[in-house]
Amino acid sequence: MSHTAGQIRATATVIDAERPTRTRDVSYVGDACVVHGIGDFDPADLGAVRGRFPGRHVTLDGDVITVRPPVRQQ
């Protein structure tokens, strides 16, 4: 399912089973999955999310982990 870049969707179940324990909520901005934490995430949390989304670019910025959509080949 594709969404416009500015569209924000509320909590999702995509990573519910394997989300970090410090997760406050999960939302989407366009096709990017954004995990918001209660306090800062650590490298182990980042690794857990990366394991759930192999081949996707996953970044950590304090209390936010962002899973970017796959790059579309043209």
Image: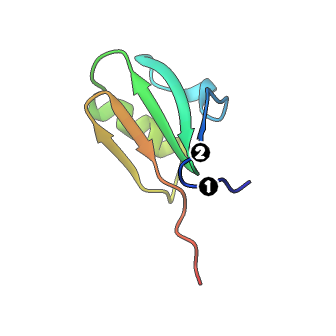
Give left or right: position of 57 versus 32: left
Label 1 Cα neighbours within 10 Å, binned few <14 / some 14-19 / many ≥20:
few
Q: Amino acid at mark 1?
A: Thr
Which label belongs to residue 4?
A: 1
Q: Amino acid at mark 2?
A: Gln
Question: Whole-percent x and y of residue 54?
Answer: 52, 53
Residue found at the far bottom of this picture: 74
Which label belongs to residue 7?
A: 2
The residue lying at 25 percent from left, 31 percent from top is 62
The residue lying at 57 percent from left, 49 percent from top is 30
Q: CA distance from mark 2 to mark 1?
A: 5 Å
Question: Please, is residue 68 above or below residue 38 in the view?
Answer: below
The residue lying at 52 percent from left, 69 percent from top is 71
The quadrant of the image that shows the C terminus is bottom right
SS for callout 2 = loop
The residue lying at 53 percent from left, 28 percent from top is 26
Question: Whole-percent x and y of residue 43?
Answer: 28, 35
Question: Whole-percent x and y of residue 1?
Answer: 74, 54
Along the viewing direction, whichever of 5 and 19 lies nearer the viewer: 5
Question: Please, is residue 37 above or below residue 32 in the view?
Answer: above
